[in-house]
Image (spheres, helix red, strand yellow):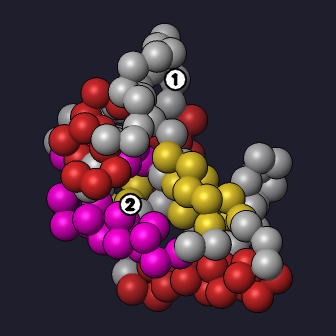
Amino acid sequence: MGAVTKIEWCHHTFNPWWGCPLCDRCYAMMLDTRWFKRAHWGPRAPRRYFGDAYWREPLKWDCLAGAARRRRRVFCASMADVFDNEVDPAVRDRLWRLIRRTRNLDWLLLTKRIGNAPEMLPDDWAADIPMSGWSC
């Protein structure tokens, strides 16, 4: 996680977990391979979950952004996919609660599994998000 990131289009990064089913030429899997011997990528691979101290960091960013009266962008799940079928749904629900609490942060949820979004987003969010459009 990055309190400050070098990614020019966001201010912070936050990963609710590490790992996903795996895509071709995945940069995240390559980083995980370097540090953990690819332990968190691929079908049925265990996801790496984080503790409460980690989950409190975005709350701090939100307070700082509010005090400065400036919005901050958070790249969420640079080392995962929010709409991964194999993730514990309780952890994804925790993410939705965190996003709701951080009113001064704009959360960027990039995915390759947009087809899963209608079933995985909170009911009151899915109606506002177009599920068709660009695809690769």
The CA distance from mark 2 to mark 1 is: 20 Å
Q: Tag count in the figure?
A: 2
The answer to whether any part of residue 46 appears in the image is: no
Q: Is residue 8 above or below residue 65?
A: above
**Which secondary structure lies at badge 2?**
strand
Relative image position of residue 13 (x, y in whole percent):
62, 60
* Amino acid bearing label 2: Trp
Which numbered mark, 2 or 1, is in the foreground of this view? Answer: 2
Q: Residue at point 36% right, 27% down?
A: 131
The answer to whether any part of residue 90 appears in the image is: yes
Relative image position of residue 122 (x, y in whole percent):
26, 55
Decide which of 26, 94 is in the foreground and name it: 94
Decide which of 121, 22 is in the foreground and name it: 121
Is the residue under label 1 in contact with that under label 2 (CB below 8 Å)? Answer: no
| Dot 2 alpha-carbon crowd within 10 angstroms: few under 14, some 14 to 19, many 20 or more | many
Decide which of 36, 112 is in the foreground and name it: 112
Q: Residue at point 49% right, 85% down?
A: 56
Name the side, left or right, on which 16 lies relative to 123: right
In this figure, which residue is indicated by the disc labeled 1?
A: 25
In this figure, which residue is indicated by the disc labeled 2?
A: 17
Q: Is residue 29 above or below residue 133?
A: below
Image quarter where the N terminus lies is bottom right
Q: Residue at point 55% right, 83% down?
A: 59
What stretch of residues is rendered in magenta?
A: 79-102
